[in-house]
Image (cartoon, helix red, strand yellow):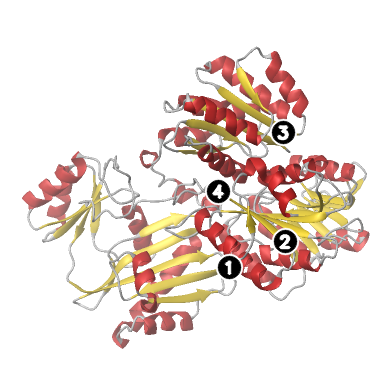
């Protein structure tokens, strides 16, 4: 079992003919992901390696039965691409693109209301169910298939670090995903916690947060009420100065809110095992799980 | 991106949002000639810097004669302005805004922000204008009105009347207030604001609504479609090394510590700074070279860290995903050869092509200290800083 995606997932890639799109599509195929279609407007009828390219998502879905879309479209056009995927009737959308204007994402988020499709990201590394499929830009080889840990994070390389340390300790993963570093994201920590709690193969959860916003606080409240599995938490940005955007558009301490200190306090209050030393994250998890 | 008050007021004017008559000056002479042009006293002289709390630092002065205008402008322009937000070294002031004084009856607070947790646009208003809104929110939460707007459907008459009612505005102001709200909302959307704040919005003795102050911040992600706003960028307000880094699309923030660091990915970069602090040292910067960095970016990032005179040791922490370890290693070697390294450099590599990367570093003949993992890296930093 896994959450959101597995070996049955039929992937289409929006922006497949771009430099990034091509590179990562190949990596996904190499990992074993079933990439069934690509979409680049105006390039319908071509192929990228063996993958047929279509002009629109609707056409690609109709012709190939794709049920998931990965988006590599540049920021200026990404919101439209996401909207096309929503209207194209896929089940899951994974938006990798970094730098989408906040206003565009707010419109998308409201457009998603009441629809069944799940949007992961944007500005995220994607999602991987180790040994089954990789939909994103993470290095596949650092993961260990078979579970029992689910990993959810707001970041990219920090997730790789955490996963690598788990794997080094012999702890495998069910599914690992980044929800994205932007202020407005399609999927929340809570959506992932709910799915991991319901997934019988996931026995424990790692939640990696960072400064800015209130996603960690909301997650902590949810965990206290609804999650029975052990949760290890980490929050990046203890040393971040207030008022500065730390790389991720969403990683900013505004006034006195959104600090790592306050998030850690709230998480500990909800009985989350918060690790304060990234250098020893693997050992810490081995102790808890 | 932040812009100056006088720039925000230009935008206000062109969007039919009432502001006091005023012009910007770079010298006491120019300030006097503007005051002469305004025709009557008092006038207000306001320092134009991006940091807030200008009033508390003496950056806002009222003048009742040309002599007072001159001495106020001289005082503000002659030395760095220290406010609660500038840090003790203060900020150099190169421009003042000279404005007509108003006869004020009441001060209100009004702002528009994107609310990340609801993905709605939030109007925040209060009758407690002219004060620090965070303080008001903490001490008198009942004095704050919040109204949410769905960006898909936009602002409707109901939103305006809800805010007006919350502010307890006189019926005679209702028409003016909804016009103001509509123009503000329009400006917010049109310019991709991440903050649009008027504190205070005043009701004058004559019964007019006027934006006495104007603060705008623009979503950095939207600058590609805000060419007009980009011309407002004032690099004097930015750290010189940060300006340099921005030329190469590097996410760099200069900090006070002495451990320079270069990391790929914002989350890992923050966590690396935390690790440095945990090791008993202070990070000199935040530098995320990004997932797709090439040799050139790595080289430029390394050079910028070396240009920071406070840096006593450098930690490079790369988890190779898209950015392969061999590419990183090449960049570091190139930069080191061109710039010369005069401080110890600890490098921790992991991920894609890690062996190849380590090989390149080893073969370079450079004096680099390699760390096995993060824990090892933190220990080595602590050891060097402790010496």
| CB within 8 Å, label 2 to label 4 | no
Q: Measuring 50% from the left and 49% from the top, which residue is drawn there? A: A245
Q: Earlier in the sequence, mark 1 or mark 3?
A: 1
Query: Mark 4 — residue?
Result: B224
User: Under tag 2, what secondary structure?
Assistant: loop
Instruction: Using the rendered image, report if marks 1 and 2 lie on a common chain.
Output: no
| CB within 8 Å, label 4 to label 1 | no
Q: How far apart are marks 1 and 2 (CA)?
A: 30 Å
User: Under tag 4, what secondary structure?
Assistant: helix
Q: How crowded is mark 3: few (under 14 residues within 10 Å), some or many (20 or more)?
A: many
Does B81 appear above or below A193?
above
| CB within 8 Å, label 1 to label 3 | no
Query: Mark 3 — residue?
Result: B350
Indicate which disc residue B119 carries: 1
Q: Distance between the residues labelled 3 and 4?
A: 34 Å
Q: Earlier in the sequence, mark 4 or mark 1?
A: 1
Residue A44, visible in the rendered structure: no
Q: Measuring 66% from the left and 73% from the top, which residue is drawn there? A: A225
Query: Residue under mark 2: which chain is it in?
Result: A
Query: Mark 2 — residue?
Result: A230
- Locate residue A203: give its quadrant: bottom right
User: Under tag 1, what secondary structure?
Assistant: loop
Q: Nearer the viewer, mark 2 or mark 4?
A: 2
Residue A152, visible in the rendered structure: yes
Relative depth, front residue between B348 and A168: A168
Does A262 appear above or below B317?
below
């Amino acid at each position: 079992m896994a959450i959101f995606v597995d070996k049955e997932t039929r992937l289409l890639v929006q922006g497949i003919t771009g430099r990034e799109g091509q590179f990562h599509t190949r990596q996904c195929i190499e990992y074993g992901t079933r990439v069934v279609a690509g979409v680049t407007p105006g390039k319908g009828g071509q192929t990228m390696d063996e993958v047929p390219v279509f002009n629109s998502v609707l056409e690609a879905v109709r012709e190939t039965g794709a049920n998931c879309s990965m988006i590599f479209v540049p920021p200026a056009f990404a919101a439209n691409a996401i909207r096309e995927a929503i209207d194209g009737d896929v089940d899951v959308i994974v938006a990798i693109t970094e730098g989408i204007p906040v206003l565009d994402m707010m419109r998308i988020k409201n457009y998603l209301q009441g629809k069944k499709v799940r949007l992961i990201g944007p500005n995220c590394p994607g999602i991987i169910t180790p040994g089954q499929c990789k939909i994103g830009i993470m290095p596949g080889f650092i993961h260990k298939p078979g579970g029992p840990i689910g990993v959810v994070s707001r970041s990219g390389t920090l997730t790789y670090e955490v996963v690598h340390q788990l794997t080094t300790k012999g702890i495998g993963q069910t599914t690992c995903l980044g929800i994205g570093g932007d202020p407005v994201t399609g999927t929340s920590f809570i959506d992932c916690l709910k799915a991991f709690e319901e997934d019988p193969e996931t026995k424990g959860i790692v939640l990696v947060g960072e400064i800015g916003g209130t996603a960690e606080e909301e997650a902590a409240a949810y965990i206290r009420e609804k999650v029975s599995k052990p949760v290890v938490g980490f929050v990046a940005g203890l040393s971040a100065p207030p008022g500065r955007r730390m790389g991720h558009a969403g990683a900013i301490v505004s006034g006195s809110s959104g600090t790592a200190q306050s998030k850690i306090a709230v998480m500990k209050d909800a009985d989350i095992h918060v690790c304060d030393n990234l250098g020893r994250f693997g050992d810490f998890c081995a102790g808890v799980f | 991106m932040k812009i100056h008050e006088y720039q925000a007021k230009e935008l206000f004017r062109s969007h039919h949002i009432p502001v006091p008559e005023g012009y910007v000056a770079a010298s006491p002479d120019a300030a006097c000639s503007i005051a002469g042009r305004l025709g009557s006293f008092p006038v207000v002289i306001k320092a134009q810097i991006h940091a807030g709390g200008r009033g508390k630092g003496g950056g806002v002065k009222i003048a009742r004669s040309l002599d007072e205008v001159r001495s106020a402008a001289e005082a503000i322009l002659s030395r760095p302005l220290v406010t609660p937000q500038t840090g003790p070294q203060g900020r150099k002031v190169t421009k003042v805004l000279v404005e007509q004084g108003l006869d004020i009856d009441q001060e209100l607070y009004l702002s528009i922000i994107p609310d990340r947790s609801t993905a709605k646009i939030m109007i925040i208003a209060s009758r407690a204008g002219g004060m620090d809104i965070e303080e008001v929110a903490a001490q008198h939460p009942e004095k704050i009105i919040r109204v949410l707007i769905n960006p898909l459907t936009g602002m409707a008459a109901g939103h305006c009347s809800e805010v007006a009612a919350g502010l307890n505005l006189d019926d005679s102001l209702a028409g003016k207030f909804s016009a103001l709200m509509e123009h503000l909302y329009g400006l917010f959307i049109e310019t991709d604001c991440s903050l649009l704040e008027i504190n205070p919005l005043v009701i004058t003795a004559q019964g007019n609504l006027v934006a006495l102050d104007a603060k705008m911040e623009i979503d950095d992600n939207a600058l590609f479609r805000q060419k007009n706003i980009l011309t407002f960028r004032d690099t004097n307000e930015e750290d010189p090394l940060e300006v340099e880094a921005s030329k190469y699309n590097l996410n760099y923030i200069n900090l006070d510590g002495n451990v320079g660091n270069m990391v790929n990915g914002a989350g890992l970069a923050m966590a690396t700074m935390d690790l440095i602090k945990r090791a008993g040292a202070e990070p000199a910067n935040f530098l995320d070279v990004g997932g797709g960095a090439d040799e050139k970016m790595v080289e430029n990032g390394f050079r910028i860290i070396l240009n920071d005179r406070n840096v006593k040791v450098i930690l490079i922490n790369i988890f190779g995903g898209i950015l392969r370890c061999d590419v990183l290693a090449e960049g570091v070697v190139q930069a080191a050869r061109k710039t010369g390294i005069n401080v110890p450099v600890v490098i921790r590599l992991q991920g894609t092509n890690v062996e190849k990367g380590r090989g390149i570093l080893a073969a370079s003949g450079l004096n680099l200290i390699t760390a096995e993992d993060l824990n090892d890296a933190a220990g080595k930093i602590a050891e060097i800083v402790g010496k």
